[in-house]
Image (tube, grey):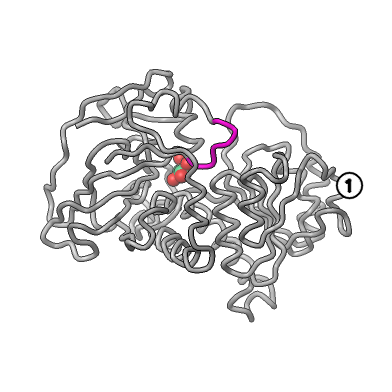
């Protein structure tokens, strides 16, 4: 069968042949891949950045944002049956630490985890994949058109969930309110797919959402966020002074960072309210040095009871939250989440897809079926 494979730390990416996998254990599931999304991580891998081939192999099948249809199940499988739509999660545990033993490899302590399509395990840009039932998430047919967004949304779900749990553990009003986010002011920095999907999840929870980017108002991403009741902030007009209380942005109860630009992201601390929570999901590429005023940063965090937290990957439960939110989104804003998939490519177009990001692209996918 065909697969898109790369040689890690090079720009060598090509169509490779792989043996079609088959079920070898009673808890395994075979899925026909229908489409796979492309994100910044994939493009970084294709540009010679962070990636690792499976042990003993020279190349890595890329792709971690999958969506497919179950074609066969082992005899012990009960979560899905042939014909169901489904996705597999990304990370596989180290086999050594407690979080991994609890199927929470997203919180692996040793760092010896593997990630399909990224780190040490072949990914999903191929025709068929097999994996174990504990990693499968069933996708209702009602969201088959947005199923490929479940993985990036799961990353946003985890970050939001962590931020809310942190607040619930320490704020008197947050422990008293099951829907703490309702009415809260949330800034989403960086309106790529993760930022827009975070905005969606936050709007579903009733938050007042402000999306910050540096594109012209009236273009696709600002319009998308406004259509779900969010507000667009053009970062080019919002200098640091204006971000202070009473300024253009005002103070935020939560900041969700999805830009991966360190210089911008530390500046945004100006906009964080007292007792606010700031959660980071961007993984900056390169190593451009940045000067930050460490004393000022410490003063803010301490004197205003602020929390800054990083979040990566997602657990099975966060994938389930993503499924639920896409179902909700379909009910509230029918057809809207679908608009995030702006570019659909044939397999043969893989080179240009991994090479660059056209300005009008939100989410690009490769269609396998
Ligand atoms: C993926 C995560 C992964 C992270 C780091 C992201 O693009 O969505 O699943 O953990 O990259 O490799």
The image position of residue 118, as x and y in percent, is 39, 36
Q: Quadrant of residue 349?
A: top left
Mark 1 C-beta closer than 8 Å to ligand 1: no
Q: Quadrant of the C terminus?
A: top left
Q: Magenta residues?
A: 358-363
Nearest the eye: 263 or 210: 210
Examine the structure image and report whether residue 328 is included in the region drawn in magenta. Answer: no
| Residue at (78, 57) in percent of width and height | 302
Q: Main secondary structure of the magenta part?
A: loop
The image position of residue 367, as x and y in percent, is 34, 39
* Location of residue 344 with respect to 137 vertically, above or below: above
* Location of residue 253 with respect to 115 vertically, above or below: below
In screen coordinates, is 2 left or right of 87?
A: left
In screen coordinates, is 168 left or right of 108?
A: right
| Residue at (26, 24) in percent of width and height | 16
* Location of residue 16 with respect to 203 vertically, above or below: above
Task: Look at the numbered disc 1 and give the secondary structure of its residue.
Answer: helix
In screen coordinates, is 238 left or right of 7?
A: right
Residue at image mark 1? 241
């Amino acid at each position: 069968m065909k697969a898109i494979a790369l040689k890690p730390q090079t720009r060598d990416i090509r169509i490779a042949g792989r043996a079609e996998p088959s079920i070898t254990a009673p808890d395994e599931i075979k899925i026909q891949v229908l489409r796979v999304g492309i994100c910044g991580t994939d493009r970084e891998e294709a540009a010679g950045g962070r990636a690792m081939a499976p042990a003993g192999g020279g190349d890595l099948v890329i792709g971690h944002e999958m969506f497919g249809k179950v074609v066969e199940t082992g005899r012990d499988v009960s979560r899905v049956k042939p014909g169901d739509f489904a996705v597999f999660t990304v990370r596989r545990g180290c086999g050594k630490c407690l979080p991994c033993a609890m199927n929470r490899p997203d919180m692996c302590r040793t760092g010896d985890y593997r990630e399909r399509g990224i780190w040490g395990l072949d990914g999903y840009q191929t025709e068929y994949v097999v994996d174990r039932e504990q990693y499968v998430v069933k996708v209702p047919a009602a969201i088959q058109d947005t199923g490929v967004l479940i993985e990036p949304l799961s990353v946003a779900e985890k970050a939001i969930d962590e931020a809310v749990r942190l607040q619930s553990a320490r704020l008197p009003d947050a422990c008293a309110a099951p829907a703490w986010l309702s009415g809260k002011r949330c800034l989403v920095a960086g309106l790529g797919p993760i930022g827009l999907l975070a905005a969606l999840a936050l709007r579903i929870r009733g938050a007042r959402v402000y999306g910050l980017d540096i594109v012209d108002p009236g273009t696709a991403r600002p319009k998308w966020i406004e259509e779900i009741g969010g507000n667009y902030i053009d970062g080019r007009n919002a200098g640091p002074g204006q971000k202070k209380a009473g300024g253009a942005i005002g103070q935020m109860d939560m900041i969700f960072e999805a830009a991966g630009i360190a210089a911008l992201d530390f500046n945004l601390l100006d906009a964080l309210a007292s007792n606010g929570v700031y959660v980071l999901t961007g993984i900056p590429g390169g190593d451009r040095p940045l000067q930050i005023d460490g004393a000022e940063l410490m003063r803010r965090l301490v004197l205003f009871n602020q929390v800054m937290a990083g979040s990566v990957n997602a657990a099975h439960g966060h994938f389930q939250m993503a499924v639920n939110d896409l179902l909700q989104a379909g009910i509230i804003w029918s057809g809207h989440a679908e608009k995030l998939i702006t570019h659909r490519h044939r397999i043969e177009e893989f080179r240009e897809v991994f090479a660059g990001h056209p300005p009008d692209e939100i989410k690009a996918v490769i269609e396998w079926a």
